[in-house]
Image (spheres, rainbow, N blue to C red):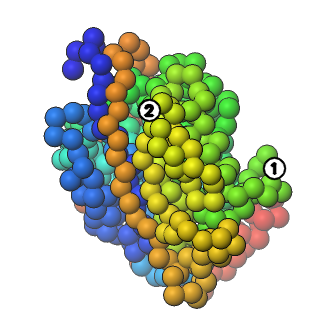
Amino acid sequence: MSSAQPRTFRAIAVQPKWSADDFVSAEAFRAWMRSQLELARPHLHPTRPNLVVLTELNGLPLVLRGSPLAARAGTFERAALLLFLSRLPSVLPVLLRERVSPIRALQLAAWPINTRLYLHTCRDLAREYGVYLCCGSTPMPRLSLRAGRIVREAGTLTNQTVILDPEGRLIGATDKVHLTPAEGAGGVDLTPGPLSELRVFPTPVGDLGVGISLDAFRADVIGKLEAQGCTVLLQPDANGAPWTSLEGLPPDPNNVRDQTVAWLESAWTATTSGKSIRYAVNPMVVGNLLDLSFDGQSAITGRAEDAPKLQSYVLTDPRPGFLALAPWVQNSGTPEELRQLGLNLAVRSGHPRENAYRTDLLHADLTLSAMTLTPPPRTSHELALEALLDEASAPVMTAGRWLPLAIVAGLTALLLRLWRRRR
């Protein structure tokens, strides 16, 4: 495509439903990821570039890989304990050497296999389907190359998005800057990314800027991307609450607005009230995963004049700006009925509609002016990611045998007590 030509392309947002069983093996994970591209296949434009955007934290449950028992533990806390017990020989050195929490040590210890599995799966799918692929996001360490070797930065684990071209080559990577409480020290224990490193990546499918979930609500992130000429905002999302519940995130945890009202402050506001951002793609994962519930309505948004049809999220008034919007499981009823339905869908509700979330796929044909921006220089981390993507895919080994439980249980209980006392 000549740089002088307008860019016309198709954007696709995939709204999948996940379960713990999708992550117990490399084969299960690859099949789940492939199913999302298969869902997109009938909607790929035959002659224009296609941009496919996947959901936030779609690689997080890979921590369950090789441990079917942990996947059936019922809660993330029990699953983490079982995983810690079975993987103590690899986790303990990380925990002690890098002075991180047990949950972060568990994820860092598995990075060589899980990061490669994630990246190689996305690379192969981008090539096979011939699409620009926003892989979603996954917990990933920061890496660098030293004397040709890939080296991990000690202690760091960010929520990270990787964007690939149709040849499976790296376009760029972005860390999430603003973490939710569930991503912080009391939950998954991730590291916030630096705002200063947010960049825009010019491509035939837009000048791509990433605002992972909460980042797309924050003025500092949107302002940073707009200052660099972002035209397409990518917002991978995993909303870990009933969609019709009340908002309770910082900076005001006592906020009593409907969550869907708050959601209008992210992609929709960025495109209808912003400066350079013309379009936004916001895919959301749904489904009950162990003891957590995920729900939402995926959307592709634009300027009001580009999307004059009046529509909006459930519990909000119709408005222009939605180019494509996934219906919720039910869009009619009183606010009280809809809020109750959100609870009925959630894990352990015992209701006949428990986990009956809606999967979906959205697409919209978008047009932008000719590309004028130049790609930003590679970071040291991106150079290391390129090296990983250039590797041939290798078989993924399963977890080894469990150590004697009596010994490991005692050590684990002691370590957890010491960690909690430190905090």
How many numbered discs, if any? 2
- Neighbours of disc 2 within 10 Å: few (<14), some (14-19), many (20+): some
Residue 238 visible, this angle: no
Quick check: 29 above or below 307? below
Q: In the image, what residue occupies the spot 58% across and 18% down?
A: 227
Residue 162 visible, this angle: yes
Q: Left or right? Give the position of 21 relative to 245.
A: left
Where residue 134 sits: x, y (%)?
38, 42
Q: In the image, what residue occupies the spot 65% across and 75% down?
A: 337
Where residue 97 sits: x, y (%)?
62, 51
Precedes in sequence: disc 1 or disc 2 = 1
Q: In the image, what residue occupies the spot 60% across and 63% down?
A: 243
Mark 2 residue element: loop
Quick check: 238 above or below 219? below
Which residue position holds label 1?
252
Kind of residue sitting beneath label 2: Asp
Asked whether 26 or 344 is in front, the reply is: 344
Asked whether 115 or 348 is in front, the reply is: 348
Kind of residue sitting beneath label 1: Asp
Which residue position holds label 2?
306
Q: In the image, what residue occupies the spot 50% across and 57% down?
A: 297
**Would you identify the image quadrant in which residue 420 lies?**
bottom right
Q: Left or right? Give the position of 9 relative to 130.
A: right
Where residue 389 sits: x, y (%)?
30, 40
Give the alpha-carbon distance from disc 1 to disc 2, as whole Å: 33 Å
* Marks 1 and 2 close (CB-CB < 8 Å): no
